[in-house]
Image (cartoon, rainbow, N blue to C red):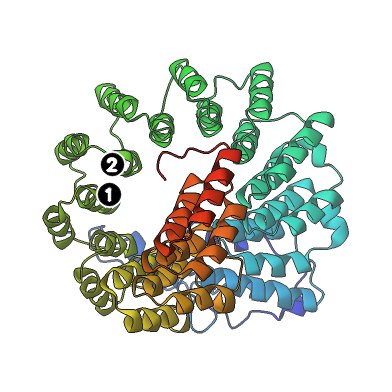
Amino acid sequence: MFQSPHAMPVQHLEPKCFPLCTCTHLVSTQIPRPLFRSSSEAHHTTNRHRPTKRVRKSRVSTPSFRKPAPTPLLSNRNPRPRTKLQALDQVVDDLEASRANGVTIDVGIFAAVLEACYELRAFDQGVRVHRLIPTNLLRRNVGLSSKLLRLYAASGRASDAHEVFDQMSKRDASAFAWNSLISGYAELGQYEDALALYFQMEEDGVEPDRYTFPRVLKACAGIGSIRIGEAVHRHAVRTGFVYDCFVLNSLVDMYAKCGDIVQARKVFDKMRSRDLVSWNTMLTGYIHHGLLVEAVDLFHRMLQDGFRPDSVAISTILTGIPSLKLGRQVHGWVFRLGFEWTLSIANSLIVVYSNHGMLDKSRWIFDNMAERDVVSWNAIISAHSKLPHAVSYYEQMEKADVLPDCITFVSLLSTLAHLGLVKDGERWFSRMREKYGIEPSMEHYACMVNLYGRRGMIDEAYAMIVKRMEFEAGPTVWGALLHACYVHGNVEIGEVAAEKLFELEPDSEHNYVLLIRIYEKAGRLDDVEKMRMMLVERGLELETC
């Protein structure tokens, strides 16, 4: 920006406030433009397309005016900020300097900067702005406090958001603040808190809007409470929002996730108008309920009604299809729609064909992808999880500078277990944390127990659980150990693993059967009979024993 030589220091500005226009550009522009141009530049721009003609020079001298000086808040910095985030950071720096010099900042400035922080997800800068806002101003200005509350809620700082909410003097004026806080709790998975706030909102007589119900319905789906969901549905009817597409899409999603797919379809069928989200939500509901025929029929109807499904809808249906015939049918639709090489769809096609043993087809799709992400590499590595090719693909992934994630290492460790490469498995398990900062999950420990167990290293597998795990082992880990004990005939550790599994999965017949077979291989027939009696007492079947 142009720096005027006449720019005054901040402390000499009168009146002591900054105009709103100084930071509204942050949301809409990449690089701040100069506020002023030279007169020659302006003349050149204005007359660029005019025919030239001679003009007699006037003897009257043109008065010279001093160029207006920009406020210090907009003064140039060296180097000029190149991104929105850098520009925002510079503005916050100037605000802090101005407050330190006793300059009163207009409420509009605070509002605009908080809006920019929210749009850019610049949460740290938002906290800095909060420190500059006078407490009494924040308490009495509901618009300003609502923006701050929304910023905290979006950043996952629900406690800070609720503190701002509690200090608001006129929070019942609109649903905006309530919606923001409900949304913040729902995004964090604190569904009970979100619903409690909704009930308080109802009790205080605050009128909901079209954004209230989707957030509340998400919380209902999160805890699986169809009873509360139905009550919210009735509230939407009473307040006239039952015909709003945004609300209806959320109702379809809530009913589907709470297990009532029939009611979800009823809401869907009664919709006066549907958008792409409506179709995708209903389609996802069918897939999650295993209703694949209905999902394919709905997908076909979606095409007939003139909706061009997006990659989310297509990937959803591809991922859920168990039939190769249906998978090929959808692939044909994808090809005709021109979506075949969309990243998410290509990834899903790799999974579809690999699930049916068509690795050549999976490799062909992978090799012809214009771009690949970590999901692409995970899909192709997982497709070859029982073959040495998986290790080769992982090495190619590293050479391509694609960072692996936790799923990558589950597939890689599973491959090494199948190949019996214990030393390689130990090396990659350590490297996962040391090089990539990925903390081992339950699945990773299960892979390592399986790795040791397949090679008959039962003591090492048991030590991995009791000495190296930093949290309580789950059924997948103990199950891998029990199976290894069955294969290699280790009765002592097998009994320990079985006892743990009986606590974690008391109704799983499979664990009892494995222990019975371990006793049978060891010739401990009395223990076999005791286990059979235990099965009968617990009402479990004996046919598979």
The reply to whether residue 243 is in sight is yes
Q: Give the camera-side residue of 251 and 273.
A: 251
Q: Which mark is residue 318?
A: 2
At x 51%, y 74%, the residue is 462
Badge 1 crowding class, 10 Å Cα cut-off, few under 14, some 14 to 19, many 20 or more, is many
Is residue 156 toward the left or the right of residue 133 in the image? left
Judged from the image, the secondary structure of the residue bearing numbered disc 1 is: helix
The reply to whether residue 116 is in sight is no
Judged from the image, the secondary structure of the residue bearing numbered disc 2 is: helix
At x 26%, y 57%, the residue is 50
The relative height of residue 303 versus residue 543 in the rendered view (above or below) is: above
Disc 2 from disc 1: Cα separation: 6 Å
| Amino acid type of the residue tagged 1 in the rendering | Ser
User: At which x and y percent is residue 76?
Assistant: 55, 78
Q: Which mark is residue 348?
A: 1
Q: Give the camera-side residue of 517 and 55.
A: 517
User: At which x and y percent is residue 185?
Assistant: 68, 48
The relative height of residue 484 versus residue 181 in the rendered view (above or below) is: below
Labels 2 and 1: the sequence-earlier one: 2
The relative height of residue 533 versus residue 475 in the rendered view (above or below) is: above
Q: Give the camera-side residue of 100 and 232.
A: 232
Picture quadrant of residue 446: bottom left
User: At which x and y percent is residue 480?
Assistant: 44, 63
At x 46%, y 74%, the residue is 461
| Amino acid type of the residue tagged 2 in the rendering | Leu
- Quadrant where the C terminus sits is top left
The answer to whether mark 2 and mark 1 are in CB contact below 8 A is yes
Q: Give the camera-side residue of 65 and 78.
A: 78
At x 48%, y 67%, the residue is 491
Badge 2 crowding class, 10 Å Cα cut-off, few under 14, some 14 to 19, many 20 or more, is many
Picture quadrant of residue 138: bottom right
User: At which x and y percent is residue 513?
Assistant: 46, 50
